[in-house]
Image (spheres, rainbow, N blue to C red):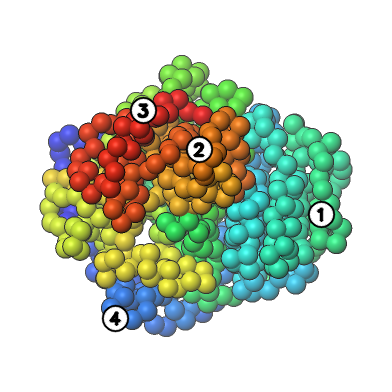
Amino acid sequence: MIPDKAPGEDVLHASGDFKKEAHVPSFEKYKELYVKSVESPEEFWADFVKDFFWKKKHNGKFLDYNFDVTKGEIYVKCMEGASTNICYNVLDRNVNDRKLGDRVAFYWEGNEPGDEKTVSYRELLQQVCKFANVLKSQGVKKGDRVSIYMPMVVELVVAMLACARIGAVHSIVFAGFSAESLCERIMDSRCCLLITADGFYRGDKLINLKLIADEALQKCREKSFPVEKCIMLKHLTKEDEGTTPGSLSPPAKRACPDLQVPWNSEVDMCWHSLMYDALDECEPVWCDSEDPLFILYTSGSTGKPKGVLHTVSGYMLYTAATFKLVFDYHPDDVYWCTADIGWITGHSYITYGPLANGATSVLFEGLPTYPDVSRMWEIVDKYQVSKFYTAPTAIRLLMKYGSEPVHKYKRDSLKILGTVGEPINPEAWHWYYNVVGEKRCPVVDTFWQTETGGHVLTPLPAATPMKPGSATFPFFGVVPAILNESGEELEGPSEGYLVFKQPWPGVMRTVYGNQQRFETTYFKKFPGYYVTGDGCRRDKDGYYWITGRIDDMLNVSGHLLSTAEVESALVEHESVAEAAVVGRPHPVKGESLYCFVSLSDGISYNQKLEAELKKLVREKIGAIATPDYIQNAPSLPKTRSGKIMRRILRKIASNERDLGDVSTLADSSVIDQLFENRCSTAV
Ligand code: PRX
């Protein structure tokens, strides 16, 4: 499956001094370790296991599992019987055992240039202990769920690690989601407390986060799920800056003391006041390997988000190992991942993976284009970033402005570049490699999912010859296969469904509260395999190329959205009888949302309605789901049994006249009408 020798032609080989000291220095070494990781996982992972502190060692198999629905319930257990604490391992172990207390954990860089703060491992540990005590004082116990809805501030990391310290389960909701989405997630995971902030700036735009959080809590109340505890961090409205012990955030240059923050003294508590009295020591709660660590929601094809559940030990090992090997981490690195912690990339590769390695990271609150399009490279130079990890959509966005904004800064500290979130087109890959990395830095195109916990297909920077646009080969312990529609494994060069044949430590354990949905979504279609939902091609050299989602999921700017989710928001409008949403290729976002709406009898389409529909989707889901195109579609193409033919709608959205086989279409006259009314410009 993996070629015996590294392919020699049409590939790019990493160069540079870093290869000599790399953890996996050659393709031969990768191959040798890969075989060991699959044949003897216990032996392979032992090297990582020994780096961590275990209150009790595991007593059973390293990995115990069933991946075959025909043989009973699906389960994965890693290191059963062991007990540990992930917060202890990423903080106390670094401060006390490894003597890294003075090392910088985070360089926080605010939205506004000049807003900055440095936090050491010792300070982070102290803050986490204090906040863990705060949570305990509010009655939060092991196993309780805590919802976190915060901007990119150090306190977000503090809140998540404080939960982990006491064995509570964090459920972080990206701060761009709407009140409705937050409410849905709070209710699904039955959270007992919400942690939020007053507000933040995204570029020029002020977001009154507390207002949205309050709306969400009100909705929960109306649905008979009252959450009567909310801790709010003052991020923009601090009047008493500098005098509050326990405050980590710097004075915000763009502070907004006049921000109208709604306050309900029966529910709301101020982060800073609670921290004032909290003790800075807190004994960790020892957790079993398979105790839940966090829930993170991801779009599901039914429209209802799925609460992906990860557990303690396997996730800890996997994020630590992938971070170390994929970014070839060394202690003098400064690492920067531009993702938001509200997504899995931030969980695994801002918080847990880097901290487990004792790494120094940049934590960035702002945007790549604010105040100008050089901001990323300015930050790279400022902190001497050596490992840089971002999304193809950000690369394509910056590429539009050419190389000049990049050349304004030196970037000579950069050693490795990474991408994640969607397929990267070769043009963007080459720009990243040539212009940003000046042909000096290998690009690691990491394929993975919220569900996989960490990278599953990825190059290793010194070992894997690169092919632009390919995520190359599996990470250790991961066994991919490509299946055809009948579920047969394809050999050699082929294209089909990407599946995995056995678990690795970081794979999700269940959908929170819905084991059945877990099994149906990932294991039913092809018994014996974990089904990713992505299409994939394997070339003659064995390289894997992700071709995109093959379910009703869209990838907009690296964010997965389900078409059903957007459709159900649209049909909530009283004027809309039916809606169908498809993806249309977009030069920066990858895909954009193209919505067809059929209106109720007697309603005519106009700009006011269009604006209302856009607003509705933003309110129901969030700004990331805002429709790019809305087309009035009096009739939709359907089969005789009434099923909407999305394949045809996708062609119409991208103005492709070759529709393929349309023999199953009930009424072919709708096609001309739909082409005639196509939207060519975004709304
Ligand atoms: O379609 C694949 C795409 O993103 C999906 C996972 O999305 P999410 O769970 O939100 O996690 C994103 C961050 C890990 C995948 O099913 N995807 C992710 N990385 C890549 C990718 N597609 C191609 N190449 C990648 N490197």
3 or 4: mark nearer the eye = 3
Along the viewing direction, whichever of 349 and 305 lies nearer the viewer: 305
Q: Is residue 404 visible?
A: yes
Q: Is the CB of the residue bearing disc 1 within 8 angstroms of ligand 1?
A: no
Relative depth, front residue between 148 and 563: 563
Task: Name which of mark 2 and mark 1 comes first in the sequence.
Answer: 1
- Name the amino acid, label 2: Pro
Q: Earlier in the sequence, mark 3 or mark 1?
A: 1
The disc, 1 or 4, on the residue closer to the chain's N-terminal end is 4
What separation in Å lies between label 3 and label 4 (alpha carbons)? 53 Å
Alpha-carbon span between mark 1 and mark 4 = 51 Å
Query: Which mark is drawn over residue 71?
Result: 4
The answer to whether marks 3 and 2 mark residues whose Cβ atoms lie closer than 8 Å is no
Q: Which label number is shown at residue 627?
A: 2
- According to the picture, the residue beneath numbered tag 3 turns out to be 676
**Label 2 near ligand 1 (CB < 8 Å):** no
Label 3 vs label 2, nearer the camera: 3
Count residues near mark 1 (Cα–Cα under 10 Å), then give few for <14, some for 14-19, many for 20+: some
User: The residue under label 3 is which amino acid type?
Assistant: Glu
Determine crowd level at label 4: few under 14, some 14-19, many 20+ residues with C-alpha closer than 10 A.
few
Please give the residue where the numbered disc 1 appears in the rendered image: 270
Residue type, label 1? Cys
Label whose residue precedes the other's in the sequence (3 or 2): 2
Q: Is residue 80 left or right of residue 15?
A: right
In the rendered image, which quarter is residue 659 located in?
Answer: top left
- Determine the secondary structure under disc 3: helix
**Of label 3 and label 4, which has the lower sequence position?**
4
User: Dot 3: within a 10 Å radius of its alpha carbon, few (fewer than 14), some, or many (20 or more) residues?
Assistant: few
